[in-house]
Amino acid sequence: MRAAPRLPRAPFRGGREQETPGTGWAFFRAWIRDPRRVSAIAPSSQSLAAAMTAAIAPTCAPVIELGPGTGVFTDALLERGVPEHRLALVELGDEFLDALRLRYPRATLVRHDASRLGSLQFFDGELAGAVVSGLPLLSMTPARVRRVLQDAFLRLRPGGAFYQFTYGFRCPVPQRLLERLGLKATRVGIALRNLPPAAVYRIERR
């Protein structure tokens, strides 16, 4: 069976902001439908994608991405050398699913709420080395944020890390919740050329 045709990807330059045609419109439709779910005024930039994936190497595979949206972080993961078939993409927004399916036919794509992963398994139960999150944690209830982190770390091997960006001035996961879950957060990057500027945090076990 022939693989689905691949849509062209914008060249990844780590700073210059380029979009694959159509991604901006998909993002706008998603924002109009549910602003709280999207919780951003523009798609994530390639400079933010570079900051989010800077510490991820092929040895981190498999990698789980929560809320890939337009695929800018997915492209960055591929540029970092993570094999496409070692990526699991968890996306709830119908606006993005068809494009993701066409662009990444060898990745595992699941339409699901990332805060309700439950018993879902990826890679025949093999634990991931990294989770990359495009989720708007600041617009989620504390209970949903807790479920996202709990489910993510059940799927992360020892030494694995959860990468999250935020537009705020501090980690989007409250310190109290981090302590309750036995986690710690470290700011590892900043993307000033993103709209708006964003910071990247690595969350890992204590």
Image (cartoon, grey):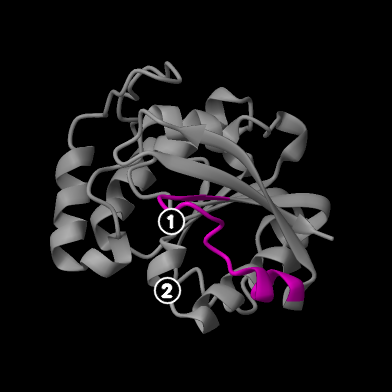
- Expressed as whole percent of the image width and height from the top left, the position of residue 152 reads 65, 65
Up/down of 154 relative to 48, above or below: below
Nearer-the-camera pick, 112 or 35: 35
The kind of residue tagged 2 is Met
Camera-nearest label, 2 or 1: 2
Asked whether residue 3 is in view, the answer is no
- Expressed as whole percent of the image width and height from the top left, the position of residue 116 reads 53, 78
**Quadrant housing residue 24:** top left
Q: Which residue is mark 1?
A: 67
Query: Mark 1 Cα within 10 Å, few/some/many (few <14, many 20+)?
Result: many
- First in sequence, mark 2 or 1: give its number: 1
Residue 172 is a magenta residue: yes
**Quadrant housing residue 194:** top left
Residue 175 is a magenta residue: yes
Nearer-the-camera pick, 11 or 203: 203
Q: Which residue is mark 2?
A: 140
What is the span of residues highlighted in magenta in the rendered image?
164-179
Task: Name which residue lies at 33% across and 22% down.
Answer: 10
Up/down of 46 relative to 97, above or below: above
Which labelled disc corresponds to residue 131?
none
Say left or right for 175 vs 91: right
- Expressed as whole percent of the image width and height from the top left, the position of residue 1 reads 45, 39
Say left or right for 42 vs 205: left
Task: Name which residue lies at 40% across and 31% down.
Answer: 192
- Expressed as whole percent of the image width and height from the top left, the position of residue 42 reads 24, 44
